[in-house]
Image (cartoon, rainbow, N blue to C red):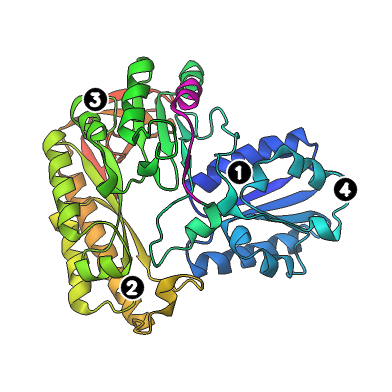
Amino acid sequence: MTSAPKFTTLGCRLNAYETEAMKDLAAQAGMENAVIVNTCAVTSEAVRKARQEIRRLRRENPDAKVIVTGCAAQIDPDSFAAMTEVDAVVGNTEKMAPETWSRLSSGFIGETERVMVNDIMSVTETAGHLIDGFGTRSRAYVQVQNGCDHRCTFCIIPYGRGNSRSVPAGVVVDQIKRLVQQGYNEVVLTGVDLTSWGADLPGTPRLGDLVMRILKLIPDLPRLRISSIDSIEADENLMQAIATEPRLMPHLHLSLQHGDDLILKRMKRRHLRDDAIRFCEEARKLRPEMTFGADIIAGFPTETEEHFENSLKLVEDCDLTWLHVFPYSSRPGTPAARIPSKVNGNVIKERAARLRAAGDAAVERHLAAQPGRTHHILMESPEMGRTEQFTEVLFDRPQTEGAIVTATITGIRGAQLVA
């Protein structure tokens, strides 16, 4: 008995985006009886979970082909190929090629086809796998950039994603027009290093140019949202859009990583603590209702209690609301893994817990300020939607999924607002 392929996605939003594209490619190739695992490599724990998931899926699908792809597979293909549970390993570029899926669907995987992983650093274009309407009924995600040219000492991702490459503005605008015609009320721009968009395109446009162009050429798009950005790369037009474009949502997720200058230098970040604070102050001056999320790492090698306290203070100094806290995890192949002064694992856990507690307190402060305010809420389900700042709002009466509902906040329930 044949069955449609099953997909498992680990890791980031971009991986989820690419899984949707792979589903289309696998269907076009007529693939059956296969399990595809799209892996993440952001931490050693992510790689461990990928192996665990592969073994579980093999036990549950003994007769299916098990195909492993994604960043972990790209970075260390041989170790995944050596797993007895795995039939084929596919690289991040190859997984977006129709011919890959035709070969995998042909029924026989020869020894030379078991590992289809080429040098990601040689890739100069973003794969033409843009798809219409990945996401929920309410929100669509559009990949405009892939890869990263920076080499932060803790990060393995450039070796899984390759160098930065951008989707031309015209292609992005055409896709978003189609999404608006399909009824989407919000589009999110995604990428690995979003603020590097345009550096490899003629005339080297910046992310702010793309944002302004989208909003100008697609007047029917109700809401545009930007995913994670590197604040040090925010350009003049992006700040202009923040100040003047109400359709650009007042919520930015910042790749900050730490709050101490010495640790930031050892991470090989391109900003210092004061740069982050200055950016947040400027953005909030231009748009008072702006909220910020941020990635912060706890326990980077050589981090002292004093260094860590600077990260903790950054939550208040930048007035951060949504924290993504990462306990430091050593990744073989990164410069940080060779730094001898490691922080004790229990200390890392304890510091990560304190950061999360600071994040919880920041969310509580944000929620406490909302009752009595009116928001335009994008409904993700009949009962739940999100404000412009991405805060969840519960409704007692069902609303139309995908619609933007104007409502006044009446209370708070747990970590959600009530309207």
Nearer to the camera, 270 or 240: 270
Position of residue 100 measured from the top left corner of the image (x, y, whole percent): 74, 44
Farthest front residue? 203
Spot occupied by residue 39 in the image (x, y as percentages of width and height): 59, 57
Residue topped by disc 4: 107
Sequence-wise, the earlier of marks 2 and 3 is 3
Q: What residue would you read off at disc 1?
A: 19
Q: Please state which amino acid type lies under the numbered disc 2.
A: Phe
Count up the numbered dots: 4
Find out whether the residues at labels 4 and 2 contact each other: C-beta distance under 8 Å.
no
> Which segment is the magenta one?
163-175
Packing grade of label 3 (10 A; few <14, some 14-19, many >=20) is some
State the image quarter where residue 63 is shown. Answer: bottom right
Side of 257 relative to 197 (left or right): left
Q: Are marks 4 and 1 in contact (CB under 8 Å)?
A: no
Q: Is residue 170 magenta?
A: yes
Look at mark 2 in the image and give the residue it sits on.
Answer: 300
Quadrant in the picture for residue 338 = bottom left
The kind of secondary structure element at disc 2 is loop
What kind of residue is marked 3?
Glu
Instruction: Please state if 60 lies on the left or on the right of 150 as rendered.
Output: right
Q: Tell me the residue at 28%/42% (across/down).
A: 252
Q: Are marks 2 and 1 in contact (CB under 8 Å)?
A: no
**Residue type (three-letter) at the residue carrying disc 4:** Gly
Give the side of residue 395 with respect to residue 250, left or right: right
Q: Secondary structure at mark 3?
A: loop
Q: CA distance from mark 2 to mark 3?
A: 38 Å
Q: Is residue 124 visible?
A: yes
Image mark for residue 245:
3
Q: CA distance from mark 3 to mark 4?
A: 52 Å
Dot 1: element: helix
Residue pictured at 24% horizontal, 25% vertical = 246
